[in-house]
Amino acid sequence: MIPDMSQQGGGEPIAQADSPAILLDHVSKWYGQVVGLNDVSIAISGGVTGVLGMNGAGKSTLFKLLCGRIKPNQGTLRLFGINPWQSTSPFSKIGYVSESERLHDWMTGLEFVSTFARLHGLSREEAVKQSERVIDFVGLTDVMNKRIGKYSKGMRQRIKIAHALVNDPELIILDEPLQGCDPLARTTIMNVIRELGAQGRTVLVSSHILQEIERITEQIVILHRGRLLALGNLHAIRSMLDEHPHSIRLTCDNPRGIAHALVENDLVDGLVFESDESLVISTHHLGDMHAQLPAVIHESGVRVTGIDNPDDNLESILQYLTRGDS
Amino acid sequence: MVENVIQTNSLTKAYGPHIALDSMNLKVQHGATGLLGPNGAGKSTLIKTLLGLITATDGEGEVLGFNIRTEGEEIRKRIGYMPEYDCLDPRLSAVDQIKYSGELLGMNPNVATQRAHEVLEYVGLRDQRYREIGTFSTGMAQAAKLATSIIHDPQLLIADEPTNGLDTQARDFMLGTVTQIVQEGGRSMLMASHLMDDVEKVCARIVMLHKGKLIAQGRIEDLKGIDQEIEVHAWGGATKLEQELNNSGLKVRRTGRVLRIIKDDDDAYSTIVEAATKTGCQIRRMHDHEPSLEDLFLVIMERLGYEVKSSEDLLATGPSARKVDAPEELKG
Amino acid sequence: MTEDVDAEFLGQEGLAVTGKARMEAAYGSGDGDEELTAQVAQTSVVGGTIFEQKYRPWRGELNPRWMRNWSILRHHLLGIVKKGHKPWGWPMRMALLSCFFVAMGDLSLAFLGTVIGDSDIYRLFGVSRGNLYGHVLGFFPRNAICFPVITALLIGGMISDDRRHGTSAVYFSRPINRRDYTAMKFISIAVILGLLIVGTLVLYYVGDILMRGEGWAWLIDTFPAFLLAALAGTILVFTYTSIGLALSSVSQGRFFPAVAFMAIILGSKLLAFLVWQLFERSVIYLISPYDVVAHIGQSLLGLSSDYSHPWTWSLVSMLLMNATALYVLTSRIASMEVSRE
C-alpha cells in the first residue's frame, strides 16, 4: 500500500529490505575504446546524495546503468537487491527526472502525472488522488489544469519531479533538476529535495552548479574520467586530503595578538598575515584546531569578527582532486 | 554625468491583450549589468525590442545613443548578441561559421578571417577552431557563440544565459572571459541569467523585470539591505551554543548547525566566542551575514506577493496550505 | 556618512530593498556531532597548459549594405563548389552535375551530328524555335525530373535550416533586415537554377552558332527566339523559386518543402492531364505551374499550343502564383523569431 506522504515532521526512514537502495560493486562500463565508468563501487541508502563531475566524467553512464538502460561490462549493480537489467521490479520504487527538456506539452499537469500514475498500476481514482498530492507537494496546484506547454521553465521542472514522485518511490534520481529555473523555483525545488531526503528516501542529484549542491546536501559522490574519486561527507573528504593543509582565516583588528597566542601551538603548521586585519592559520588537524580556537581567542582578548575555512567547499575539493586534468 | 548605454522611456509592447513590456523606464549604465526576472518576465521581449527587431507599441528607447525605432541597423552594428539557444550550423567548422558571421556584419572576407581566428583564440578554442561545430561539447559551443558575438568588438554585449549547461571549469572560464571584456576592453554588457552567483560575480548593477514591469534597478550593493546578522556554523553542540547565546541575551535563529545572531553592537562577537568556549562547541565559520543577490531576488519576489514554500508548507495535507514564508520561523 | 544610493525599487528612487534573508541548511549537516565518514581515491596530477588571454580590440570599418548582402550570396553560391560555405552536401552536388549534363544533352547530340556528318541528327537537335523552347520547357526529362528535383533540393533547407539550427539569430542580430535576407536567398536559388536552365541555353545557342559556322544573318534571325526562350526560362526559374522558397519558409524541416514542391509541380500537372484526358478540358492546367509557364513560352515563341485556353489566362495565373508565393514568403520571414522560444 502506498504510505501517506503527508507526514508532518519527518525522519522516519521508510522500511526497506536489508539491501541498500543503490549498490555498485566494481562496476565498469566502456563503449569501445571510451571508458564510461571504471571500477566504481558505491553503496547509497537513504538521504540526499550529490553526484558531481565534469562533463564526460561518467555521470550519464551511471544514471543510464541505474535506469537499466545499459548493463555493466563488469561488476554487479543492484537496486534494492535486484538487478535492473534483468528485472523491472525495482522500477516501481524508482522515480527518474531526466535532463531532457521535452515534455508532453499538450497535456495538463494533472493529466501528465496521473497518466504516469496509471502506468504504475494505480486505478483511475487512485491515480488522480495521488497526482493531486504530489502536485501539491511541489507547489503546482494552481496550475495543474493548465497545459504544460504554457508552463514556465521552473514549473516544467517541478511537474517533472511530481511525475517521478507519484508512485511514492524510495529512490529518486534527478539529473540537473535546477536547470533554467529562476531563483524562486530553484529554492522551492531545493526545499522539495531536502524534504524527500529527510523523509528517508534515497535521492540522487546531479548538477553542474556546486553552490547549489552545497545548499542541498553534504553527502557527495565525485566522479572523474569514469573513476570514483571520493564518496561521503564533503567535510570529511576535505579533511582527508592530507597533502593540502587546512586554512582557517581569522578576521580581527589585532592579528598579531592571536598569532602570539598560537605560535607555540603544536597543531599550527604556519601563520600568515594576509593583511592588517586577517590571519591565516595553516594546520593539518582541522577538528582539533577548531576545538581549541574559541578558548584561545577568548583568552587572548582580541575581538575576532570573522572565522572562515576558505577551502572547505566543493569547489576547492574538486580542484584539489582533479587538479591539472581537463 | 554618466551616459546611459541603454535608456528607455515608457517603453511598451503589447501583443493584443497580453502586455509583454509595460511602460518601462530603463537606465542601463556603462559596465556589466545583470538582467534578472522570473521566467516570462519579458526579458527576451526587451532584448529583441532593444535590438530593433520588434517594434514597440508605445514609448521610446535609445541604445548607445541610437533610436531603437528608426536606427535599428546602427544599433545592430555595435551590439553583440549571444542567444540562449544554439545559433550555429553544426556542419560548418568554427572558424568558417564565425568568419561568415563577421562578413554578415559587412567585414571584408580577409578581415573577417583574421578576426575569426583572433576571437576564437581569445575564447579558448584555438586548437578546435577547424573542427565542425557539431562535434563541440556544450562548453565549446557556448564559447563559439560568444566568439560570434564579439567578432566585431561591439560596444555592448547582450548575453542570454551564457553559462547554460556549463560545468564548473567552463563556467569560470566563460565568466572570466566576459568580465575581461568588460574590464580590460572597456565594453558594456547586459547579462540575463538565473544564476545569481554568476551575476554577482560579473555585474555591479542589476535590472529586474517582472510581468513586463521594471521593478528594481541599480547597484547591487545599494539594493541590498543591511541585515546586521552574524552567521555562525557550529560543530559539536549547536543546541547548547544556542542555549548559551540566548542566556547571554542575544536573539538567535537556527537551522541545523547554522545559526544567525542579531548584531546589536560590536560586542556580539566576543559574546559568541565566549559562549563557544563555555560550551566546548567549535565555531567553524563566523561572519557578518551579507545577503546574496539571490536573497535579494527572493525578498523582492516576496514583496510582490510570491512566496517560496518552506518545507512545512510542502508537507501540509490540504492544497489550501499557503503560508507566507516568514524567515524567522524555526525549522525542526 | 551619506552616500548616493543608486537604486530604484518599483519606480521609487533611492529605495533599497531590505528584509531578513532566508536560512537553509544542507541535508546531512546535522549538529556536527556525528562521525563524518568519507573515502578518497589516489589521484595523479597532470601538468596543465599555459593560456594567455588578451583582449584585442577592433577598430575596423564595416562595409555598407550591399557588401553584407553580397556575403550572403557568396555563402550560398560558393557553397556548391567550395568547402567552408553553405554545406550543400554531395547528393545535391551530384544531382546538379547530372542535371547539367542532361540539360546539355541537346548540344551534345547536335555536336555528335556534326562530327558524324549526319545532318538529320543535327537538324533534330540544332537550334530552332522548337528546340530553344524545348531546352527550357521541354517536359521530359527536364521538367519532369531534373528541374523540379534540383529546385526541391535547393529549397529544402534554405530557410528551415536557419530555423532549426537557430542561425536566424545570427542573421537578424546583425544589421541585415529581413527583406535583404529573403531577397538574397531568393537570388541565390534563382542564380543556380538560372545557370542550369538559362545558362545552359546560352551555351547551347553559342555552341550551335560555333558549330554551324553561319553568318550574321542567321544570328539576327534566331536571336529574338533565343531571347524569348531565355525570357521563358527566366519566368520558369522565378516561379519555381518563389513557390519553393515559400514552402521552405513554412516548415521547420528539410523534407517537407522538397516533397511538397515536387508534389505541387508534378501532382498538379498529373491532375490536369487526367482531367484533359477524361473531359477534354484544358482549363485545369491553370493550376500547374509548369504548364502555365510552358503555355506562355509557347505563345512567346509562336509555337502551336497544346492548350485550348488563351495564353493570357496562363499569364494571369502565373502572376497570381508568384504573388501568392511571395506574400507567404515575406509574411513568414517577417514573423520569424530571432531565437527559438
Image (cartoon, rainbow, N blue to C red):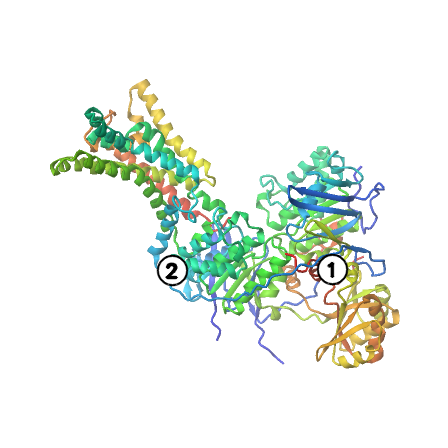
Work out whether B254 lies above or below C154.
Answer: below
Q: Which residue is mark 1?
A: C24
Dots 1 and 2 on the same chain? no
Location of the C terminus of chain A by quadrant is bottom right
The quarter of the rendered structure image containing the N terminus of chain A is top right
At label 2, counting other C-alpha atoms closer than 10 Å, the crowd grade (few under 14, some 14-19, many 20 or more) is few
Image mark 1: chain: C
Q: Amino acid at mark 2?
A: Thr
Residue C196 x/y as whole percent: 31, 38
- Element marked by disc 2: loop
Q: Residues within 10 Å of mark 1 (few under 14, many from 20)?
A: many
Kind of residue at badge 1? Glu
Residue C45 at x, y = what percent?
Answer: 69, 59
- Residue B39 in the image: state x and y as whole percent: 58, 53
Outermost residue, top side: C278
Q: Quadrant of residue C232?
A: top left
Instruction: Where is residue B238? Give x, y as percent.
Output: 83, 64
User: Can you say whether C330 is above or below A316 in the image?
Assistant: above
